[in-house]
Image (cartoon, rainbow, N blue to C red):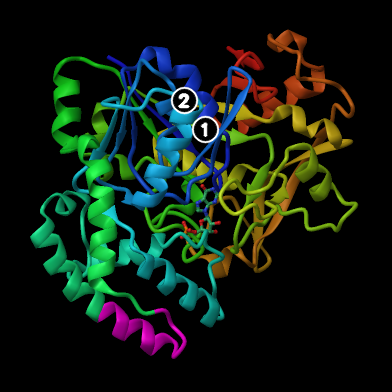
């Protein structure tokens, strides 16, 4: 029985959706276990481009049951928008999409709270502005957290929301005299309206997944964001508010991590990051620099916010950290074709921190900020078209050497190489 996780090992946007799509025939369930409508998934399927932020990308596959686990934070508006967009595009959405009754609900006051805190604070995180952090704060704080299952009990829901909104209005006003204020009854009516549409999808997904395990069904876990944005193991505080590495699977779905049979770590052939925070290998070299060339060729603009992604060289120190943390068995190397725009390629194999060479990933952003990368430089494959290669032997020798070197440094096999967005533009080893 296959129980696979596809997880990003960098700062997100590693093109995990393509790998999920490739593996869909080997599994019957696809599960998201962390995050919310902050994820940016672009999948190209049968010539059509789909952009999803809350639903698992596996939902595009009719033979998979798509599960939104308890570890997520849900904005019902986004949920219904994505469902409607997919239906309009001819994708079947019915009982194949299941939403955990334990997942937490995002309300507009979460978005307002985040806006005010990001505006006011010197150390703004550069979030996606979708209310993710404040919603997780309420989950952990307990008094103000409201779960999806509560939507199904209108009197109880109204009672809870009235108490929570009263507290939230006070708090928001304390943050700013201009803060938006919310009407509990209006919000309640709005959300109870959504509840009618969500109802057919709501279930206890932990029970569902345990039954699936008992029946020997294949489960594919689809991580959102990247491991370096993990709340515990990433570049704190410039992280997201959930466990975006494989560590989130157990808590975010109820499936014990030891049931996993395969962990595929997905990496880009270079590195990108959206939002603030340390990025040692960043190519911050202006409008005609290498960073910009990679950004344009790789179309590196955020799916959720449209922000230009920061681009840089492959950071093997960072990836080694997230691969170890995630129990990764093998690597999928994505967007290799993009590096055809550079003369030579560099791999960061260590850092210099306060005059000393280190080969580990410092756990704190203020230390990582001080790290200077040390690089190995290799010949590139400038202007060569990789997008038609379907076998390793069809890649330029320099590109093959780059893959082998990454594999040797990280001590992991590279089993999948992607040379373009389409399903066919893939080399399976
Ligand atoms: P939040 O998740 O909206 O709180 O944002 C926290 C940080 O994570 C910001 O730097 C975001 O840009 C980043 N982030 C959140 N989701 C994604 C994603 O799916 N891809 C890349 N970065 C993300």
Q: Is residue 219 magenta?
A: no
Occupied quadrant, residue 12: top right
In the depicted structure, whether residue 76 falls above or below residue 396:
below
Q: CA distance from mark 2 to mark 1?
A: 6 Å
Q: Residues within 10 Å of mark 2 (few under 14, many from 20)?
A: many
Secondary structure beneath dot 2 equals helix
Which residues are the magenta region?
A: 167-180
Q: Quadrant of the C terminus?
A: top right
Ligand 1 within 8 Å of the CB at mark 1: no
Residue at the image position 22 percent from the left and 44 percent from the top: 196
Residue 255 at what x, y percent from top left? 22, 34
Ligand 1 within 8 Å of the CB at mark 2: no
Does the image show residue 412? no
Residue at the image position 33 percent from the left and 59 percent from the top: 106
Residue closest to the eye, 13 or 166? 166
Horizontal side, residue 71 vs residue 372: left or right? left
Occupied quadrant, residue 205: top left
Residue at the image position 67 percent from the left and 51 percent from the top: 309
List the residue tagged with mark 2: 20
Q: Are marks 2 and 1 in contact (CB under 8 Å)?
A: yes
């Amino acid at each position: 029985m296959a129980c696979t996780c596809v997880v990003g090992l960098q700062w997100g946007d590693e093109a995990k959706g393509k790998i999920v799509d490739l593996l869909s025939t080997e599994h019957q369930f696809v599960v998201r276990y962390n995050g919310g409508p902050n994820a940016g998934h672009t999948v190209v399927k049968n010539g059509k481009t789909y952009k999803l932020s809350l639903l698992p990308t596996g939902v595009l596959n009719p033979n998979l049951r798509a599960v939104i686990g308890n570890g997520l934070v849900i904005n019902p508006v986004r949920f219904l928008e994505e469902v409607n967009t997919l239906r309009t595009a001819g994708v079947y959405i019915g009982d194949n999409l299941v939403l955990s009754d334990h997942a937490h609900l995002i309300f507009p006051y979460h978005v307002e709270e985040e806006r005010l805190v990001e505006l006011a604070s010197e150390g703004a995180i550069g979030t996606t502005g979708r209310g993710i952090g404040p919603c997780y704060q309420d989950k952990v704080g307990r008094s103000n957290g409201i779960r999806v299952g509560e939507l199904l009990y209108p009197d109880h829901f109204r009672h809870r929301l009235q108490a929570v909104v009263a507290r939230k209005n006070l708090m928001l006003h304390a943050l700013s005299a201009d803060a938006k204020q919310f009407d509990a009854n209006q919000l309640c009516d709005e959300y109870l309206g959504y509840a009618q549409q969500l109802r057919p999808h709501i279930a206890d997904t932990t029970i569902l997944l345990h039954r699936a395990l008992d029946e020997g069904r294949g489960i594919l876990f689809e991580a959102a964001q990247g491991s370096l944005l993990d709340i515990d193991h990433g570049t704190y505080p410039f992280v997201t508010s959930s466990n975006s590495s494989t560590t989130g699977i157990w808590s975010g779905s109820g499936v014990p991590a030891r049931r996993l049979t395969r962990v595929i770590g997905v990496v880009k052939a270079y590195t990108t990051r959206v939002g603030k925070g340390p990025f040692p290998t960043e190519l911050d070299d202006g409008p005609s620099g290498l960073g910009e060339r990679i950004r344009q060729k790789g179309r590196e603009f955020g799916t959720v916010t449209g922000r230009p992604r920061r681009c840089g060289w492959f950071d093997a120190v960072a990836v080694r950290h997230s691969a170890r943390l995630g129990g990764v068995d093998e690597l999928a190397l994505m967007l290799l074709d993009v590096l055809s725009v550079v003369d030579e390629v560099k791999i960061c194999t260590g850092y210099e921190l306060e005059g000393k060479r280190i080969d580990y990933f410092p756990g704190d952003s203020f230390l990582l900020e001080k790290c200077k990368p040390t690089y190995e430089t290799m010949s590139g494959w400038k202007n060569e078209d990789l997008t038609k290669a379907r076998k390793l032997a069809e890649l330029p020798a320099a590109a093959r050497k780059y893959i082998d070197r990454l594999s040797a440094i990280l001590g992991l096999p590279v089993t999948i190489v992607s040379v373009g967005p389409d399903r066919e533009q893939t080399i399976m080893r």
